[in-house]
């Protein structure tokens, strides 16, 4: 998405005015030109610089910490990592070929991913991750299964 079509920076109800906190990234006067002595440090920020390099074997990863609870899933070709307060030591690492089934448990603001491998593994994530996580797991392990009836 290019910056001109990005409405997320517009003031609600007044699309012709920019949100002053962000400025217009298409307007060079906000940040100056490369090499310009007046250029602000914010113009040189690249948010990828704040994170360590990703493992080249990583296929998919999502994580979130909300209200002190951390949930994450990392999918590699040979293993799955689930981080959750429900896991002993906060994390479980298990081989991908041990995954027998998986499913999603719907919630309002959150959903839970449950993976049956050596044991059941569970983590909660914000609903915004649901579609992309589902797509990654379908590609890796096939369609979700129906949770077992207790």
Image: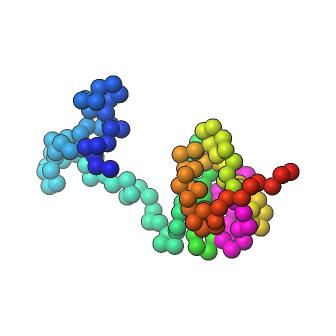
At 25% from the left and 49% from the top, the residue drawn is 43
Q: Residue 15: x and y, percent?
A: 28, 30
Q: Which residues are magenta?
A: 82-102
Q: Residue at x 56, y 61 (%)?
A: 136
**Frontmost residue, 78 versus 36:** 78
| Quarter where residue 76 is shown | bottom right
Residue farthest to the right, as pictured: 150
Tell which of 2 and 68 is nearer to you. Answer: 2
Question: Along the horizontal axis of the image, is 44 left or right of 8?
Answer: left
- Nearest the viewer among 14 and 87 is 14
Residue at 60% over, 39% down: 109
In this rendering, would 149 be left or right of 24?
Answer: right
Does the magenta run of residues contain 101? yes
The answer to if 114 sits in the magenta stretch is: no
Instruction: Pinpoint residue 126: horizontal percent, then vertical percent.
Output: 58, 45
When asked about the image quadrant of residue 81, the answer is bottom right
């Amino acid at each position: 998405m290019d910056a001109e079509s990005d409405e997320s920076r517009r003031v609600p109800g007044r699309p012709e005015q920019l949100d002053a906190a962000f400025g217009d990234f298409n307007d060079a006067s906000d940040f100056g030109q490369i090499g310009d002595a007046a250029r602000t440090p914010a113009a040189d920020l690249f948010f990828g610089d704040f994170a360590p390099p990703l493992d080249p074997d990583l296929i998919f990863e999502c994580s979130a910490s909300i209200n002190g609870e951390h949930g994450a899933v990392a999918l590699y070709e040979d293993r799955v990592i689930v981080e959750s307060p429900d896991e002993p030591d906060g994390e479980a690492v298990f081989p991908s070929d041990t995954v027998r089934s998986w499913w999603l448990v719907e919630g309002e603001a959150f959903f839970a991913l449950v993976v049956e491998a050596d044991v059941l593994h569970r983590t909660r994530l914000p609903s915004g991750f649901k579609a992309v996580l589902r797509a990654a797991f379908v590609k890796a392990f096939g369609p979700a299964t129906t949770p077992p009836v207790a």
